[in-house]
């Protein structure tokens, strides 16, 4: 079929996002272009403009990219990157970090288009955990 | 429920299939992901029933939200042109969950 929608995970913590990446591999992310941007350039807690930009470029294989921030300055940094490098097929998504990533990965792995992957991530807010 | 279509021939190609599976293991993240990705491949409308709740198995979070544990039973129901294949594929994933 066509190419797969890419997913970028932006977190204050390299360890947090690496752990989430491992969980997503269990759920079937091996066919999804998934890139992470965790922590600052020198490995501290925070966010990095350059890491976010590089992750978006890695994840974009032609079908678009959703960017999932964990919270706070992850949102601000991702927003700044997207303002400086506007691309119609790169979308910042407001969703719970873990649940949104899980739902987005499954949708992308199923061959969904960008709009559907965005909706899957956003809907994660409304699905009860139990 | 109510016939709302002016096409009279489609009904003959529609089939309803249903099967109940007893889970060999808890329905955790990995099989839930497998199930959701498999369910998305079919055009039939698929439902997963567990403990009085019915969900659409294409939603991985909804599948996990069932909280289905080992030895409990789930019913897969599909309606559509590929209902039998859908039920077979999903039942296979559930029956082999680890």
Image (cartoon, coloured by chain):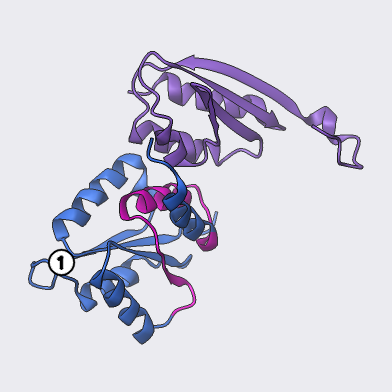
Res A3 visible: no
The percent position of residue B95, horizontal first and vertical second, equals 43, 19
The answer to if B58 sits in the magenta stretch is no
Q: Which quarter of the figure is the C terminus of chain A placed in?
A: top left
Res A47 visible: yes
Element under label 1? loop
The percent position of residue B49, horizontal first and vertical second, equals 54, 25
Label 1: chain?
A: A
Numbered disc total: 1
Residue receiving disc 1: A39
Q: Which residues are magenta?
A: A87-115
Is B77 above or below relative to B4?
above
Q: Which chain is blue?
A: A
* Label 1 neighbour load within 10 Å: few <14, some 14-19, many 20+: many
The answer to if A95 sits in the magenta stretch is yes
Name the residue located 36 percent from the left edge and 53 percent from the top edge: A101
Q: Nearer the viewer, residue A38 or A129?
A: A129
Which image quadrant for residue A127?
top left
Name the residue located 55 percent from the left edge and 54 percent from the top edge: A1
Q: Nearer the viewer, residue A57 or B97?
A: B97
The percent position of residue A64, horizontal first and vertical second, equals 46, 67
Name the residue located 43 percent from the left edge and 50 percent from the top edge: A124
Is B28 above or below relative to A23?
above
Which image quadrant for residue A71?
bottom left
The hue in which chain B appears in the rendered picture of the protein:
purple
Q: Is residue B90 left or right of residue A31?
A: right
The percent position of residue B43, horizontal first and vertical second, equals 65, 39
């Amino acid at each position: 079929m066509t190419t797969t929608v890419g997913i970028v995970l932006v977190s204050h913590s390299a360890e947090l996002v690496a752990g989430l990446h491992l969980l997503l591999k269990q759920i079937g992310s091996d066919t999804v272009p998934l890139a992470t941007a965790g922590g600052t350039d020198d490995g501290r807690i925070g966010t990095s403009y350059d890491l976010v930009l590089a992750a978006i470029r890695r994840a974009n294989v032609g079908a678009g990219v959703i960017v999932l921030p964990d919270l706070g300055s992850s949102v601000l940094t991702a927003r700044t990157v997207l303002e400086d490098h506007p691309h119609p097929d790169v979308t910042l998504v407001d969703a719970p970090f873990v649940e949104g990533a899980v739902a987005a990965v499954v949708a992308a792995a199923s061959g969904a288009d960008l709009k559907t992957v965005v909706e899957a991530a956003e809907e994660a807010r409304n699905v009860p955990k139990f | 429920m109510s016939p709302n279509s002016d096409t009279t021939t489609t009904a003959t190609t529609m089939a309803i299939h249903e099967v109940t599976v007893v889970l060999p293991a808890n329905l955790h993240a990995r099989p839930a992901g497998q199930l959701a990705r498999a369910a998305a491949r079919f055009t039939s409308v698929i439902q997963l029933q567990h403990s009085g709740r019915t969900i659409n198995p294409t939603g991985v979070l909804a599948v996990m939200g069932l909280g289905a544990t080992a030895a409990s039973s789930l019913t897969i129901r599909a309606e559509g042109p590929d209902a039998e294949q859908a039920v077979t594929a999903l039942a296979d994933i559930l029956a082999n969950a680890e």
